[in-house]
Image: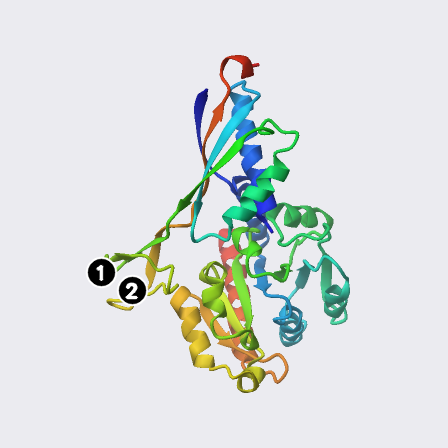
């Protein structure tokens, strides 16, 4: 029996496609968000609120990873934003190949912001780079203050953590400071916003931050040319 | 259950290596899986049983080495095991900890049948 050394990253194939996706996004000056959360934490609501707030000033589109229905896409399109549903059967995460395929059907040319709404799941999507500029993770406060620790890999890799549905904090018996402390303990670098898509509290700060990120990306692209 | 995707990737990498060296029967695939990944050993073992069918790894054994999570403080250099508490802040100085190991997902080697297995 012969032993052959391999020493290859198991996710190498995905990583290579993600790098290609990232190169394309950078060339276009498009800020790309990989939006992740547990099911029902408010990804689509957050998107709706964000789209409304950015209102017509930017060219936006959404890739929707909800495989079973067209419901999320319908909500985004109702706001006049282009949305493309990534349909590939019932899988538990999006990977770079699915995004690359979507890009052939839905060109991102000239877009300022593309949001890839991942499958509602705090485990599997954490391992797959899609070529995004930012990983944004939403945590609904009612999920419990320990959530960031239970799903440490996902929260550790986030660039932004949005603590959503803060209007439910008191009713759920959740101390927001404890939740934020738990985020900080697994990820000291993430930018954290406490928001409520229902009342609108905290959304201004998030949208202002996002606007800066979009503009910075655009400036970087202009500087490159 | 992304372990099925992981298992398929493992087999693709192993098959590519075997073909490159002109072998057609893989007996063992050794992988290193970090504790600070989202891969569950039992789920990966089960997924591998399914994914190996009709591949060069049809009869292969999957050997999984679990790589412990180790973190180090970038400021004071103290090394610790954070898994129980899942706190990535240094207990001594409070600064963020760097993950030294535990994020590995690697096919380390394959074992192939020599003589009869060679094309």
Q: Position of residue B91 (x, y in %)?
A: 27, 67
Q: Residue at x 24, y 61 (%)?
A: B75
In the shown orientation, is residue B102 left or right of residue A52?
left
The reply to whether the C-beta atoms of the residues labelled 2 and 1 are less than 8 Å apart is: yes
Q: Residue at x 62, y 54 (%)?
A: A93
Q: Position of residue A113 (x, y in %)?
A: 61, 62
Q: Quadrant of residue A184?
A: bottom left
The foreground one among B107 and A200 is B107
Q: Earlier in the sequence, mark 2 or mark 1?
A: 1
Evaluate whether residue B118 shows in this view: no
The foreground one among B40 and A93 is B40
Mark 2–mark 1 distance (CA, rounded to whole Å): 9 Å
Q: Which residue is mark 2?
A: B90
In the rendered structure, find residue B76 and report the number of the disc placed on it. 1
Q: Secondary structure at mark 1?
A: loop
In the shown orientation, is residue A91 left or right of residue A150?
right
In the shown orientation, is residue A220 left or right of residue A90?
left
Where is A151 relative to A204, above or below?
Answer: above
Q: Position of residue B52 (x, y in %)?
A: 61, 34
Q: Residue at x 57, y 21 (%)?
A: B24
């Amino acid at each position: 029996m012969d032993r052959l050394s391999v020493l290859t990253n198991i996710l190498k194939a995905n990583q290579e496609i993600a790098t290609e996706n990232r190169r394309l996004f950078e060339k276009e000056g498009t800020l790309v968000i990989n939006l992740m959360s547990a099911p029902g934490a408010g990804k689509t609501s957050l998107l709706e609120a964000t789209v409304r707030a950015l209102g017509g000033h930017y060219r936006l589109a959404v890739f929707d990873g909800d495989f079973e229905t067209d419901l999320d896409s319908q909500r985004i399109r109702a706001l006049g934003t282009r949305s493309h549903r990534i349909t590939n059967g019932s899988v538990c995460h999006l990977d770079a190949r699915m995004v690359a395929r979507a890009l052939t059907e839905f060109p991102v040319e000239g877009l300022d912001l593309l949001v890839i709404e991942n499958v509602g799941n705090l485990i599997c999507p954490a391992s797959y780079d899609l070529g995004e500029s930012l990983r944004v993770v939403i945590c609904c406060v009612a999920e419990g203050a320990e959530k960031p620790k239970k799903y440490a890999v996902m929260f550790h890799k986030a660039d932004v953590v949005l603590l959503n549905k803060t209007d439910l904090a008191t009713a759920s018996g959740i101390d927001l400071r404890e939740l934020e402390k738990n985020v900080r303990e697994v990820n000291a670098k993430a930018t954290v916003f406490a928001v409520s898509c229902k009342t609108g509290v905290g959304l201004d700060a998030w949208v202002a931050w996002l606007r800066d990120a979009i503009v910075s990306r655009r400036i970087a692209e202009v500087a490159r040319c | 259950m992304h372990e099925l995707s992981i298992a398929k990737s493992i087999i693709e990498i192993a098959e590519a290596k075997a073909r490159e060296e002109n072998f057609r029967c893989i007996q063992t695939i050794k992988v290193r899986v970090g504790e600070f990944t989202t891969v569950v050993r039992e789920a990966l073992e089960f997924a591998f049983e399914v994914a190996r069918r009709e591949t060069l790894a049809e009869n292969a054994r999957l050997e999984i080495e679990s790589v412990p999570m180790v973190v180090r403080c970038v400021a004071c250099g103290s090394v610790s095991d954070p898994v129980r508490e899942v706190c990535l802040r240094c207990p001594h100085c409070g600064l963020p900890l760097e993950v030294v190991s535990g994020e590995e997902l690697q096919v380390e080697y394959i074992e192939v049948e020599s003589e009869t297995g060679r094309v």
